[in-house]
Amino acid sequence: MNPTSNITVASPNIKYTEDYIFSEYDYEETLVTKCERELVAKPYRTSLSIRTGRKVGKLGVMLVGWGGNNGSTFTAAVLANRHQLSWNTKNGHMNANWYGSITQASTVRLGLDENGGDVFVAMSKLLPMVHTDDLVIDGWDISPMNLAEAMGRAKVIDFDLQHKLRKEMQTMKPRPAIYDPDFIAANQADRALNLIRGTRYEQYLQIRADIKDFRDKNKLDKVIVLWTANTERFCEVAVGVHDTGDNLEKALRQNNSEISPSTIFALA
């Protein structure tokens, strides 16, 4: 895929170098205050300096809860589009596409042409952007089920497409994940067989090691970690535990029971 933007902005507020696009942008807003019986609106401006990289690197995505409905469906969608697959459904023949993706299927009004007509461009061409077909995917799950089995269990992907993806997705197996029954629904207990053991700090170190292993093995420039696992109950937010970064790290090392799995992943 060619992710390079072919749009150039001719403005004194934009500067291009070989590696970056530098832009100066004034964000305008209005502060509204109540003064006795009237509202006072006061416009204000915030100046922003934005730097955007021009070289699109190799991007990895790690999903927490990779073997769930969201993770398996996302993976199947990326692979179906990457391989330009087609399949039969009860409503007829279907070709893989990115309809519904805001970056891959939507357009943005750029401005007017010389005749006053609107000019629209694909959102993916506004700036240098990774194409979704090029994502490298990995992740964690408390179930050891491979992604082909997880896709079948989710019952989201059409059966004919499942058949075409099965061989590749059978090779995809989630890394062990963190399981804390105090934070998620009890109905997950039966599938919690693929776990990172140890204290919360030891689990944190393992997650960091997993991210590094994924990055190094695939020679990635960046890694994004997304939460697609079950929702958790709220933590009992406490002063001295969650209020500062230093306290949070200290509580993690002390194996504080109100440090949730999602917090451990975020810290890692």
Image (cartoon, grey):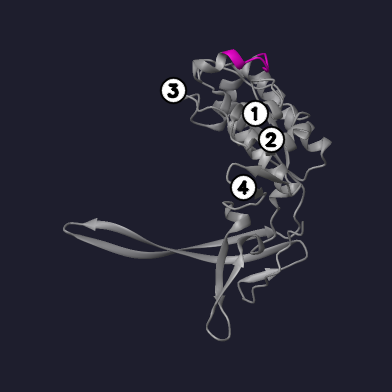
- Tell me the CA gap for discs 3 and 4: 51 Å
Q: Secondary structure at mark 1?
A: helix
Q: Residues within 10 Å of mark 1 (few under 14, many from 20)?
A: some
- Tell me the CA gap for discs 4 and 2: 16 Å
- Tell me the CA gap for discs 4 and 1: 21 Å
Q: Which mark is residue 152?
A: 1
Circles 3 and 4: CB distance less than 8 Å? no
Circles 1 and 2: CB distance less than 8 Å? yes
- The residue mark sitting in front, 3 or 2, is 2
Q: Position of residue 96 (x, y in %)?
A: 67, 49
Start-end of magenta stretch: 190-198
Query: Is tag 1's residue or tag 2's residue first in the polypeptide sequence?
Result: 1
Occupied quadrant, residue 19: bottom right
- Tell me the CA gap for discs 1 and 2: 7 Å
Residue 227 visible (yes or no): no
- The residue mark sitting in front, 3 or 4, is 4
Query: Is tag 3's residue or tag 1's residue first in the polypeptide sequence?
Result: 1
201 lies left or right of 218: left
Q: What residue lies at 59% left-to-right and 53% top-to-bottom?
A: 99
- Tell me the CA gap for discs 3 and 1: 37 Å
